[in-house]
Structures are given as C-alpha cells and as structure tokens.
Image (cartoon, rainbow, N blue to C red):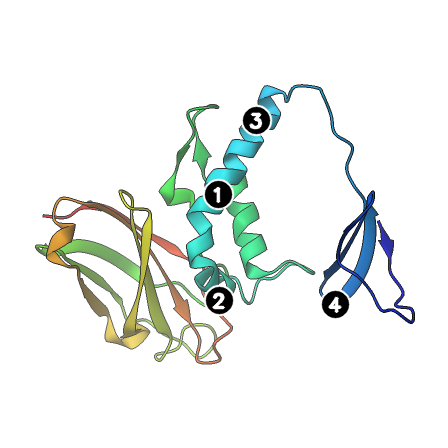
Amino acid sequence: MARFIKGIHGSYQGKVGSIVGSSWRGIDYVRSLPKKSSKAASEDQMAQRMKFGMTTSFLKSIKDVLMLGFSDSKQRNKTGYNVAFQQFINNAFVGSYPNFTIDYAAVKIASGGLASLVGLQTVEAFPKVLSLSWDPIGNRFNAFDDDQVLVLLYDQADNLFFAYEGATRLDKTMDITLPDSYTGKTIVGWTFNIHRDGVTTSGSQYLGEFVLT
C-alpha cells in the first residue's frame, strides 16, 4: 500500500486496472488487487470467517450504542465499534466450528472508567415488566448521582435490539415495560452508565436471560 499525494487531477477512488484507490480518515492511498488463490480455505479460516459474519450480524444494528459505550476506551486509531468488534470475536463464542453459539454473558457493550452499578438485580416483577434495582452508592470521583443508566435488550428470535434510558444512578430502580407481543420470548440484557459529559462510561453489566411471561 502506498500514500497518494494529490496532483493536478486530485486523488481517485475505485479500481483502475490492477490498482485500487481509496481513502481512510482523510488519507488517500493506492494498493494492488489481491491475487486470487485456488487453494481451498482451511477449517481455521472458515471458522474465522463464520465468526466474522456472526459478529457483524450481531453488532451492526447497535453501532451507535457501541461508539458511545467504548467512547472513552478507544485504542489508537480504533473506533469504539472496532474495539467492541474485536472483543466480541475474541471472547463471545463457545463451541466448535461450524456449531458456534454466542455466550451473551461474555458480550461487552461498554468499557470505561465510570463505576458500575452496585448490587444490581433484574427480575420480571410483572408480566413483561423487567425491573432493575441497585444500591445508589456514589462518590465525587467516578460514581455521580446524575450518571445516566442505559439498558440494552436483545430479542433473540428476531435479532432485534432496544435501548432504554430515563433513570440515573440516584434513582436506584428502573422498570421497562415490553409489549404484549413479547409474551414467551427470550430477552437478553446489558446495562452501563454514562457521565454527564456524554463521553465517559462504565463497563457494561450483564443482566441475564429472561423468558417473558
């Protein structure tokens, strides 16, 4: 790969013969097309491709949440989504190829220096009502009364995510009412806290897996 210094005609993007022009973070560059291989992919390669596809499918619809959740833990030029993607593909799979499944307890949707909720519990208090409770313990360093609580719920059957807000660390409870159509569905959840600066977050906490009555 080579950097492209703009000339009188500027830079270009796309394929020209065996050369591809592109741009990343404002840097223009050119590279040659990869050579096609007639060699069959190994099982390790196929396993990695399967993990990559499953990770993309799972995370693509919550990219904005992940960009926020990992906003204060970026690594060099990686975005929050990139960090979340790497964490997922390295830690969230159980089983062997081609029978991979996702370990939801190992999924992280946030990472940061803000304190997590203390004594967190989640129950279905009423039919289709998930009730979160925690101890409203704060301090002036990394656990503030007005830290926002964000809850992310995942519908396994339909591969859908829903985000809920509206509570603070000081509130000590949060109730989430789901529609009647969710009766009998399996829901997975996570939560994390967001500082008033909109950047600093806590690490995510796994709420568990619930079959709604």
Answer whether residue 60 is visible to the viewer in this image: yes
- Looking at the rendered image, the disc whose residue lies closer to the viewer, 1 or 4, is 4
Task: Work out whether mark 1 precedes mark 2 in sequence or the reverse, and give the earlier one.
Answer: 1
Q: Residues within 10 Å of mark 2 (few under 14, many from 20)?
A: many
* Percent coordinates x, y for residue 55 in the rendering: 48, 43
- Mark 2 lies on a secondary structure that is helix
Q: State the residue at coordinates (71%, 65%).
A: 25
Figure quadrant of residue 151: bottom left
Judge depth for marks 1 and 2 and give the one in front. Answer: 1
Question: Badge 3 is on which residue?
Answer: 46
| Vertical side of 64 occupied by 209: above or below | above
In the displayed structure image, the side of residue 152 where residue 18 appears, left or right: right
The reply to whether dot 3 and dot 1 touch (C-beta < 8 Å) is no
Q: Is residue 108 visible?
A: no
Q: Position of residue 33 (x, y in %)?
A: 78, 41
Which residue, given by chain and number where applicable, does mark 2 sit on?
68
Amino acid carrying label 3: it is Met
Q: Is residue 112 left or right of residue 42?
A: left
How would you rate the neighbour count of disc 1 (Cα within 10 Å): few for under 14, some for 14-19, many for 20 or more?
A: some
Instruction: Say few, some or many: other residues with alpha carbon within 10 Å of mark 3 (under 14 / 14 to 19 / 20 or more).
Output: some
Residue that badge 4 annotates: 26
Residue appearing at x 41%, y 25% in the figure: 99
Horizontal side, residue 134 vs residue 17: left or right: left
Name the amino acid type tagged 1: Thr
